[in-house]
Amino acid sequence: MPLALRRAIRRGRALRRLRPPKAATVRFAALPFIGRRPATIRVEAGKDRQVRLTAGPLELRLAEGPEELAAAQRLRYEVFYTERGAVPTPQMRMAKRDFDAFDESCDHLIVLDTEAAPENPPIVGTYRLLRRDMAAKIGKFYTQDEFSIRRLLRGKQQVLELGRSCVAMEYRRALTMNLLWRGLGLYAHVHDIKLMFGCASFHGIDPQAIGVELSYLRHYHLAPLRLRPKARRKRYVNMNWHEPGSYDPKAARAALPPLIKGYLRMGGMIGDGAVIDEQFNTIDVCVVVRPDRLAGPVARQFSVLGKDGPVKS
């Protein structure tokens, strides 16, 4: 490995400085918070900024065309509305799809099971991605309905909103989440994302029932003021239900939803205040993740054996 590359990795700058190859076969060591099972993943991220990962029968890429978008929306409907009790609009109920005005302007990461139906593989996982330049065409980010994110939008750096993350019940295992998390990392690298943020949810709309978890997030993972989103005044729900020392932090962390725990393990930080979303039957917090904080750990996951020896994508 070239000396300059080793230094870049140690300084946490590898993903920020190095461009991905057009195509490469990648050997990932499993991330500690995802699972311990390694997976060989093929990456394609060329000049056209395609993002593609495969692991066994599963393939991750961006949705292509209205049919795949509709399939991702049907998966979202199944998880959010049928399984978790969100309240659909009459149009959503008729179509059996979760959709809104943001979908057409977003990129949608999808995971497909190519073994289940090779000719028409089902979508078994998805993530909605909204970059700053995309949001400019709509006039806002989805998160802004619940949180003030003006501090995140200072300057002209590229930021990415994460949303509508879900996985089909029978595919909620390490391999699927490996693809989604690493797909996010590769997408952020390809598009030079400086900040990622979005709403992460607790099931149910009673904040007192999760008072310990909300208190833990505020006491141990509150974002610094310069990066701190804040719940809208009319929707603000206090997170400080219990004083520090009055609860067990380890037990509180263990009780968090898996997605929020995953963000925290990536260095995620939490905004000020929570928001009740009655339509989705959730209590939302705003999470902020800095991809540059992940550069060292994630770069080691993108170890590639190329024709000139090990390189980094």
Image: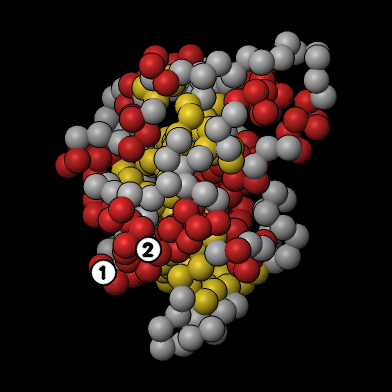
Given residues 238 and 191, the one toward you in this image is 238
Eye-nearest disc, 2 or 1: 2
Mark 2 neighbour density, 10 Å: few (under 14) some (14–19) many (20 or more): some
Mark 1 neighbour density, 10 Å: few (under 14) some (14–19) many (20 or more): few
Residue 203 lies in quadrant: top right
The residue furthest bottom is 119
Residue 277 visible (yes or no): yes
Q: Secondary structure at mark 1?
A: helix
Horizontally, residue 288 falls left or right of residue 6, namely left
Circle 2 is placed at which residue position?
96
Q: Which mark is residue 65?
A: 1
Residue drawn at x 55%, y 64% is 168
Residue drawn at x 62%, y 53% is 300
Q: What colouring style does the render use?
A: secondary structure
Residue drawn at x 50%, y 40% is 281
Point out residue 32 in the picture as x, y percentages from the top left corner. 72, 50
Point out residue 301 in the picture as x, y percentages from the top left corner. 61, 56
Precedes in sequence: disc 2 or disc 1? 1
Given residues 306 and 274, the one toward you in this image is 274
Point out residue 37 in the picture as x, y percentages from the top left corner. 73, 65
Q: In which quadrant of the rendered image does the N terminus lie?
A: bottom right
Point out residue 186 in the picture as x, y percentages from the top left corner. 46, 55
Residue drawn at x 55%, y 16% is 238
Given residues 38 and 23, the one toward you in this image is 38
The amino acid pointed to by label 1 is: Gly
Residue 291 visible (yes or no): no
| Cβ atoms under marks 2 and 1 closer than 8 Å | no
The residue furthest left is 137
Q: Which mark is residue 8?
A: none
| Separation of residues labelled 2 and 1 (CA atoms) | 19 Å
